[in-house]
Image (tube, rainbow, N blue to C red):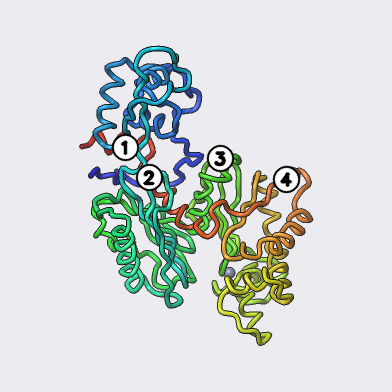
């Protein structure tokens, strides 16, 4: 098994759009300049599907037949690339006569990635293939707010069970991707500041996952990974988007020109704790007052409902009630959208995204929530910033968290530089 651990500090802001393709400007063209294409770059071309035969690799990179053969030999040896005999001619290849060319392709089954979206009352876990597709998944319903020593062993046990279910051993794990609510120190793989997950701050999570061998562990914020889940979704169309996670809490993941913006300290996107006049004097669960979460967060809605004598366990239930036609729940969800939209309008003016993607539990009452949100975003943002603005739900729905955790981890271990390092340091 390859050691895919990143050497040196891991690189936040890994490119997403992630066509881990050639560098801009040399798409499909022989490379100019004197630096020959690396092993990792050849892998990126094959992974993105831009090339699928030896001669296409040669044309796209300008490498000699011998150099192509040597790089492919290493890639085939690693299992990350496989050859399929037969099939029709590849695009751009002459058809008539001769043997059909042998096709090269990225081997999505050359290992697995483990994904865990850790939450306050529920943790979603999955085993994914190297394309990031979920092979098997499971939810851990837990006591509200468990500490890492309590929850992480359960996470490990559940992931081990899922691995067994798909018939893979721990040695097949290439990477682990986890998300937690709050601000995350991406480089250290630990929460930096999560008011709703007491006991998790500065606790590195990798040591809990030693049972999965040398597989590197990456940790990011919950809204950031949901934004990354759109790499196979809205990001195939839009390069600039803001993903809003509206659940118990409210957070945002920002993608600008294909890159995730984490900010100077990783605190970008803490939308829920923006002060708003509508929440003046109201105490937020972060300890401060006046945050938009105090009027629009799922926890605040549940609290309001209970104060009115209505029994409701979680925002998931409240949103389902709204979707089912409960007038009181509908009103609260619509108001939540309206209040959040007021704050989001400033984000739209500032970033001019092509799309605002809505995820989280509130999506269960999407139409009601977005009706309110649309109203105040359009009223509060400029005509130009909203002229072509698309507001849409997440592509992967309830699986966005685990799909995003897998996408985030795969970005780190399968980018050209990481593969180059892993294969040349053997
Ligand atoms: Zn707050």
Whether residue 61 is situated above or below residue 275 in the rendered picture:
above
* Residue 294 rendering spot, x and y as whole percentages: 63, 72
From the image, which quarter does the C terminus lie in? Answer: top left
Whether residue 106 is situated above or below residue 296 in the rendered picture:
above
Whether residue 373 is situated above or below residue 421 in the rendered picture:
below
In the picture of the structure, the residue carrying the numbered disc 4 is: 385
Is residue 153 shown left or right of residue 308? left
In the picture of the structure, the residue carrying the numbered disc 1 is: 80
Most foreground residue, 209 or 83: 83
Query: Going from the N terminus, do you reach mark 2 or mark 1 first?
Result: 1
Tell me if label 1 and label 3 are in contact, CB under 8 Å. no
Whether residue 306 is situated above or below residue 358 in the rendered picture:
below
Residue at (74% x, 75% y) in the render: 327
Residue at (70% x, 59% y) in the render: 370
Secondary structure at numbered mark 3: helix
Query: Going from the N terminus, do you reach mark 3 or mark 4 first?
Result: 3
Calculate the distance from the C-alpha at mark 4 to the C-alpha at mark 1.
43 Å
In the picture of the structure, the residue carrying the numbered disc 2 is: 130
Calculate the distance from the C-alpha at mark 2 to the C-alpha at mark 1.
9 Å
Calculate the distance from the C-alpha at mark 2 to the C-alpha at mark 4.
37 Å
Calculate the distance from the C-alpha at mark 3 to the C-alpha at mark 4.
21 Å
**Nearer to us: label 2 or label 4:** 2
Calculate the distance from the C-alpha at mark 1 to the C-alpha at mark 3.
23 Å
Tell me if label 2 and label 1 are in contact, CB under 8 Å. yes
In the picture of the structure, the residue carrying the numbered disc 3 is: 236
Callout 3 crowding tier (Cα within 10 Å): few <14, some 14–19, many ≥20: some
Secondary structure at numbered mark 4: helix
């Amino acid at each position: 098994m390859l050691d895919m651990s990143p050497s040196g500090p891991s690189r936040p802001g890994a490119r997403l759009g992630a066509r881990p393709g050639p560098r801009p400007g040399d798409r499909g063209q022989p490379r100019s300049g004197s630096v020959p294409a690396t092993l990792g770059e050849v892998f990126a071309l094959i992974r993105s599907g831009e090339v699928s035969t030896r001669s296409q690799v040669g044309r796209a990179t300008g490498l000699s037949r011998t150099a192509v053969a040597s790089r492919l030999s290493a890639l085939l040896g690693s299992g990350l690339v496989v050859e399929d005999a037969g099939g029709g001619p590849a695009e751009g290849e002459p058809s008539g006569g001769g043997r059909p060319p042998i096709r090269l392709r990225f081997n999505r089954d050359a290992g697995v990635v483990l994904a865990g979206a850790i939450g306050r009352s529920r943790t979603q876990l999955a085993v994914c293939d190297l394309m990031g597709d979920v092979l098997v998944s499971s939810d851990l319903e837990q006591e509200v707010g468990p500490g890492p020593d309590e929850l992480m062993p359960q996470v490990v046990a559940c992931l081990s069970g899922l691995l067994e279910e798909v018939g893979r051993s721990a040695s097949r794990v290439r990477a682990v991707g986890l998300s937690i609510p709050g601000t995350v120190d991406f480089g250290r793989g630990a929460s930096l500041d999560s008011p709703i997950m007491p006991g998790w701050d500065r606790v590195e999570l990798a040591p809990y996952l030693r049972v999965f061998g040398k597989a590197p562990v990456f940790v990011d914020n919950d809204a950031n990974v949901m934004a990354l889940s759109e790499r196979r979704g809205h990001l195939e169309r839009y390069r600039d988007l803001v993903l809003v996670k509206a659940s118990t809490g409210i957070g945002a993941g920002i993608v600008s020109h294909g890159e995730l913006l984490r900010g100077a300290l990783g605190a970008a996107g803490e939308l829920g704790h923006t002060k708003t006049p509508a929440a003046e004097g109201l105490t937020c669960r972060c300890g401060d007052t006046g945050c938009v979460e105090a009027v629009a967060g799922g926890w605040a809605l549940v609290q309001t409902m209970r104060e009115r004598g209505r029994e409701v366990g979680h925002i998931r239930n409240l949103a389902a009630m709204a979707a089912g036609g409960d007038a009181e729940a509908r009103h609260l969800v619509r108001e939540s959208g309206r209040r959040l939209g007021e704050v989001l309008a400033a984000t739209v003016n500032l970033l001019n995204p092509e799309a605002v993607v809505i995820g989280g539990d509130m999506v269960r009452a999407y139409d009601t929530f977005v009706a309110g949100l649309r109203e105040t975003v359009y009223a509060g943002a400029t005509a130009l910033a909203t002229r072509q603005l698309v507001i849409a739900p997440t592509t992967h729905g309830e699986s966005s968290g685990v799909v995003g955790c897998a996408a985030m981890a795969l970005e780190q271990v399968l980018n050209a530089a990481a593969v180059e390092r892993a294969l040349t340091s053997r």
